[in-house]
Image (cartoon, rainbow, N blue to C red):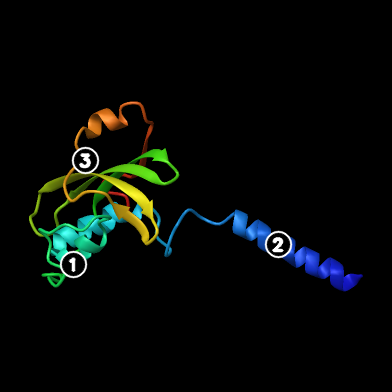
């Protein structure tokens, strides 16, 4: 009887743990993609940019690795949730290579079988209309660290 209760308790615990699991694949959530993109763009790492895209872009070279190791430290990240598998982001960041230069990227991030990916290489067309009826969530302000 004790074994049965122990097995049932353990099974219940596993089910609860699985149900409470995160929405992340490979330890990355959708909000990680804009920051990874900003870093890869700053480093001019075409291979990394290509790996973050859902559909491959012929303008990027998969053999072209990072030109530098600079990382984005100051950025503002705003999220709009479309669904559990679809988010829109706007990231504005200080370029660590060119002082006093801000860059803004708007992107759609979707859940794929191979993790979270950006849908397009460039900004999303009609971004302002897509987010007009959605509630923005500021995930990070420019100088939070």
How far is mark 2 from mark 3, CA to CA?
A: 42 Å
State the quadrant of the C terminus. bottom left
How far is mark 2 from mark 1, CA to CA?
A: 41 Å
Placement of 121 over or under 129, stated as above or below: below
Asked whether the viewer can see residue 45, the reply is: no
Asked whether the viewer can see residue 85, the reply is: yes
Label 1: which secondary element: helix
Image marks 2 and 1: residues in contact by CB distance under 8 Å: no
How far is mark 1 from mark 3, CA to CA?
A: 21 Å
- Which numbered disc flags the more N-terminal residue, 2 or 1? 2
Q: Is residue 39 left or right of residue 7?
A: left
Q: Is residue 81 left or right of residue 129?
A: right
**Residue identified by numbered label 3:** 124
Tell me the crowding category of disc 2: few under 14, some 14 to 19, or many 20 or more residues within 10 angstroms, Cα based: few
Residue 69 x, y percent position in the rendering: 17, 69
Residue 79 x, y percent position in the rendering: 34, 41
Please tell me which residue is depicted at 79% across the width and 64% down the height of the picture.
Answer: 8
**Residue 42's image quarter?**
bottom left
Please tell me which residue is depicted at 15% across the width and 64% down the height of the picture.
Answer: 46
Label 3: which secondary element: loop
Label 2: which secondary element: helix
**Residue identified by numbered label 2:** 13
Residue 142 x, y percent position in the rendering: 26, 46
Residue 131 x, y percent position in the rendering: 31, 32
Placement of 69 over or under 24, stated as above or below: below
**Residue identified by numbered label 1:** 47
Q: Is residue 132 left or right of residue 6?
A: left
């Amino acid at each position: 009887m004790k074994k049965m209760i122990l097995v049932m308790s353990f099974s219940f615990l596993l089910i609860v743990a699985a149900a409470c699991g995160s929405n992340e694949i490979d330890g990355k959530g959708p909000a990680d993609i804009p920051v990874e993109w900003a870093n890869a763009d700053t480093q001019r790492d075409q291979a990394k940019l290509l790996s973050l895209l859902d559909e491959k872009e012929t303008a990027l070279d998969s053999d072209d690795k990072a030109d530098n190791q600079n990382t984005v430290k100051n950025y503002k990240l705003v999220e709009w949730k479309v669904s559990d598998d679809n988010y829109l982001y706007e990231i504005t960041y200080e370029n660590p290579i060119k002082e006093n230069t801000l860059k803004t990227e708007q992107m759609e991030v979707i859940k794929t079988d191979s993790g979270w990916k950006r849908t397009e290489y460039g900004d999303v067309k009609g971004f302002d209309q897509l987010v007009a009826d959605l509630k923005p969530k500021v995930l990070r302000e420019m100088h939070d660290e």
